[in-house]
């Protein structure tokens, strides 16, 4: 699964566009942990009833344009108390402190984290799809050079998955429609290839691709501990944190957390970040190819995978982000880059799932950037960009669904 960095864009407006003509007020600010003062990324910021929303960036900062009749902003993040703050239309930046929230659970978890994980893994064939399914998804990949977007590609794709008792060998991705915006500056062209791309929803489905981190062999590389429990979707969850053991491996390992439904033992969320202390190992792990004369310095690799639950649990949302610096010999300054891929499921077909034809499917060696045939329909996306590159796709889809329901 590949990204090709030849990179992108976007000098278009990066906010959410409203089709109705209305008076808008721009509100900016920063969200921090009230106890530690740490900046909080990916905090959801909404106006409630109006459906306008965004999320904070890596520095905890946000900008949101709100309708004139909006009177408050709502800040929410997993494990923290939701805050409603009255809108200050003076134009001064606001600073919001979020308070951590421990969720009391009935009963006491007496099992070891290893035993809970083993039970959750054994229950995967029960808790996840038992037959083949096809999902329609919205997919996006972006590249930033510093704070500037130099590449944005978006697509509607079909994701075909076999039963979760199988491996990922027959799981495929088919792009239906797409668009991209690429920076015209020659200096923005890097030409490197790193991990990522349209096959990300296949390879980073942690629950189905158990060889990635949930195999017995891989689990021996980690130590586990029970963390503070939380609620997700109103259901109590056990949280198990993991970190690498002091073992010598030829590849880097991860730090992270598993969120496991207390009742069903289904994985609801997995959060991971790569140990980047050994840059040589990380470079070998992440980097597929690069031009000669370019020095690659990995800074971080983070993964989030979310599963929704109704009758059974299914992959719903996935995000992977790689941060690195590249410098050229004989140049004084290095350039920081952030490359991300993100996918959210918008609909499913469990009754008539059809495999993706080989001629249309991506392989792990394919880069979306190189497939120019997907970018020919210039009118496909209409006149407006309704999802900003800085807005998480699952938050954006929820917002659009709420907005359409009110119309």
Image (cartoon, helix red, strand yellow):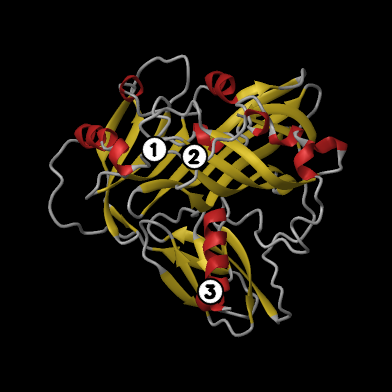
Give the mark, 3 or 1, whose residue is nearer the N terminus.
1
Q: Residue at x 32, y 39 (%)?
A: 241
Residue 290 shows in this picture: yes
* Left or right, residue 219 beside residue 93: left
In the image, residue 39 lies at what x, y percent?
50, 54
Residues under numbered marks 1 and 2 in contact, where contact means CB atoms less than 8 Å apart: yes
From the image, tell me which residue sits under label 1. 256
Residue 55 shows in this picture: no
Question: Which residue is at the front of the view, 85 or 91?
Answer: 85
* Left or right, residue 181 beside residue 325: right
From this view, report whether residue 26 is shown above or below residue 137.
Answer: below
Label 2 residue SS: strand
From the image, tell me which residue sits under label 3. 405
Total residue callouts: 3
Quadrant where the N terminus is found in the figure: top right
Circle 2 packing at 10 Å, graded few (<14), some (14-19), many (20+), is many
Q: Residue at x 24, y 32 (%)?
A: 118
Q: Which mark is residue 75?
A: none
Question: Which residue is at the front of the view, 286 or 89?
Answer: 286
Q: Residue at x 56, y 77 (%)?
A: 50
């Amino acid at each position: 699964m590949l990204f090709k960095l030849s990179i992108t864009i976007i000098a278009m407006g990066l906010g959410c566009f409203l089709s109705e003509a209305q008076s808008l007020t721009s509100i900016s600010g920063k969200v921090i942990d009230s106890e530690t003062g740490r900046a909080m990324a990916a905090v959801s910021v909404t106006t409630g009833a109006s459906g306008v929303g965004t999320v904070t960036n890596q520095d905890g900062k946000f900008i949101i344009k709100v309708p004139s009749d909006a009177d408050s902003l709502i800040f929410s993040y997993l494990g923290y108390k939701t805050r409603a703050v009255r809108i200050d239309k003076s134009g001064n930046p606001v600073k919001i402190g979020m308070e951590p929230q421990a969720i009391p659970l009935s009963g006491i978890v007496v099992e070891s984290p290893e035993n809970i994980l083993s039970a959750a893994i054994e229950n995967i064939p029960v808790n996840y799809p038992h037959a083949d399914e096809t999902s329609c998804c919205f997919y996006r990949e972006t590249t930033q050079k510093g704070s500037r977007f130099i590449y944005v590609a978006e697509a509607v794709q079909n994701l075909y998955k076999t039963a979760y008792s199988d491996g990922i060998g027959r799981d495929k991705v088919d792009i239906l429609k797409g668009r991209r915006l690429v920076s015209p500056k020659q200096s923005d062209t890097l030409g490197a290839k790193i991990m990522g791309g349209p096959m990300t929803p296949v390879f980073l489905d942690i629950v189905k691709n158990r060889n990635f981190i949930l195999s017995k062999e891989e689990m021996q590389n980690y130590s586990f501990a029970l963390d503070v429990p939380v609620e997700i979707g109103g259901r109590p969850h056990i949280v198990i944190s993991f970190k690498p053991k002091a073992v010598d491996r030829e590849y880097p390992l991860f730090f992270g957390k598993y969120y496991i439904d207390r009742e069903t033992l289904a994985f609801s969320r997995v959060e991971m970040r790569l140990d980047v202390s050994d840059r040589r190992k990380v470079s070998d792990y992440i980097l597929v190819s690069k031009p000669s004369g370019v020095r690659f310095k990995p800074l971080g690799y983070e993964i989030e995978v979310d599963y929704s639950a109704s009758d059974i649990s299914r992959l719903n949302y996935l995000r992977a982000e790689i941060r690195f610096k590249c410098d050229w010999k004989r140049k004084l300054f290095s350039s920081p880059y952030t490359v991300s891929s993100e996918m959210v499921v918008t609909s499913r077909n469990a009754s008539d799932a059809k495999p993706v034809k080989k001629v249309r499917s991506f392989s792990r060696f394919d880069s979306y950037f190189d497939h120019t045939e997907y970018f020919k329909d210039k009118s496909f996306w209409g006149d407006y960009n309704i999802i900003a590159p800085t807005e998480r796709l699952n938050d954006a889809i929820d917002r659009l669904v709420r907005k359409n329901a009110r119309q």
